[in-house]
Image: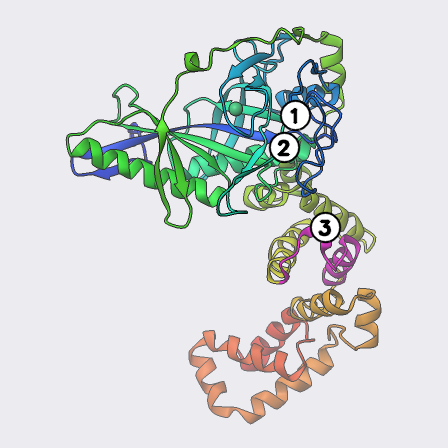
Amino acid sequence: MSSQKVKEKSKPTNLLAGATGDWEVIVGMEVHAQVASNAKLFSGASTAFGAEPNSHVSLVDAAMPGMLPVINKECVAQAIRTGLGLKAQINLKSVFDRKNYFYPDLPQGYQISQYKQPVVGEGEVEIDVDGETMKIGIERLHLEQDAGKSLHDQHPDYSYVDLNRSGVALMEIVSKPDLRSSKQAQAYVTKLRSILRYLGTCDGDMEKGNLRADVNVSVRKPGDKLGTRCEIKNVNSIRFIGQAIEYEARRQIDIIEDGGTIDQETRLFDSAKGETRSMRSKEEAHDYRYFPDPDLLPLELTQDYVDSLKSNLPELPDEKRSRFMKTFGLSAYDADVLVAEKALADFFERACLSSRDHGVSATSLIASWVINAVLGRLNKDGITIDQSPISPKQLGDIAGLIGTGEISGKIAKDLFEIVWTEGGDPADIVEKRGMKQVTDTGAIEKAVDEIIAANPEKVEQAKAKPSMLGWFVGQVMKATGGKANPAAVNEILKTKLGI
Ligand code: MN
């Protein structure tokens, strides 16, 4: 027999344990992403956030009789760019339909959406979870109008309606039910958001409601057919998406294991309680009486137009990640962290260019400084990379100073803090404050001799137990104010201690 192991078919790792055995969780997402555009989908009214209620409402948005919608070309271009970024089929002909329902914040009595013929067809998004890369299928992307907003908490007796959002363009991005855990679902939305932000087609600001997810959850025994799903509406943070799925899957498993059945329904996630609760029994598509909007012609595109948008797409996260790994020699993990936000990736690249002015290539070093020092400090100060007090050039200079051996890694941390809080040219600061690394072996030897002379017992211990060396290194660094070159310190100590 050969010693080669037969690879066993791996058991799905995302199963949830129940009283009657393991359960598989099936998740599909419908993400509503607000199109980055100055004007609304069918009117010229502004989409600016935070304005006085009802100050950005055209006659079209207020559904005044006789007003006709006119499609905003930029919103269509944004949808196509997004489709291309999702490696999706772009449909050269698509149709706008009316989705009929009544709600006080929907003055038309219908939403203009796309039903049977969306502008974008099947595509995919690649996610990485626990070191495994998966492709999540995209079913479609269509354009539709947002509704207005009902305000219920302004007055004890009345509700108010704000139509500023009425008619704002949304892209509804529908995934296939390919997700198998809350973690995968979170990774999917995180990746999708990153792609949209790279493309500049949606700012992805979940706090403003510019990206919200409807999460479809069902459970089944592995190998069984799909179970009945519940849709959790409008979940507006990555963390809540995870919590909502965990809660909902467990709720369904408990019901089935107690002999019950799942009702198809629409549910709400209560973030304060961390649970989902029933909102209404799920409506079917036919309840909406969809029909093509007679006020709008079918949307027809030329292949040339689509190609011209394609040729102007920016580099996207997956491509940037491969390039960072290949040209900068970064680990998959470092590359992942850096490309998640375009601004962070740009910061890293510019810092690398700066460090080259010092004649060193310090890409891994810079990656680690951006990920640990910069991100850590931004987090502490509660600011974003665009607001970083340290510039890519300054960080590149610090890395250059480490790379050329002018400062030690320990001193670099102090230098980083000085530049962060006070600003200034890193090389100047090092010069003026005497922070240069001591590579002069004479000075190091002197410090070593003094420490050896003052600690005879420790010297004996170190001879028997070489791991004591670390203690001596620490003492020398302390005595030299952290400026001694650690490699030189090690070398000299080993010789003098005879280990
Ligand atoms: Mn929708």
Label 3 sits on residue: 386
Q: Which of marks 2 and 1 is nearer the N terminus?
A: 1
Vertical side of 139 occupied by 302: above or below = above
Choose between 2 and 279: the one closer to the eye.
279
Q: What amino acid does circle 3 point to? A: Asp
Which quadrant of the rendered structure holds the N terminus?
Answer: top left
Figure disc tally: 3
Q: Say which residue appears at 44% left-offset and 39% top-offset.
A: 241
Looking at the picture, the colour scheme in use is rainbow
The residue that label 2 is drawn on is 163
x and y percent of residue 365 in the render?
66, 54
* Residue 499 visible in image: no
SS assignment for the magenta stretch, majority: helix
Marks 3,1: beta carbons within 8 A: no
Q: What residue type is labelled 2?
A: Leu
Q: Mark 1 points at which residue?
A: 62
Is there a contact, CB below 8 Å, between mark 2 and mark 1? yes
- Residue 32 placed where, x, y %? 55, 29
**Side of 34 where 157 appears, left or right:** left
Viewed as shown, does residue 76 lie left or right of 174?
right
> What whole-number distance in Å separates the C-alpha atoms at marks 2 and 3?
32 Å
Q: Which residue lies furthest to the front in this view?
A: 157
Q: Nearer the viewer, residue 270 or 323?
A: 270
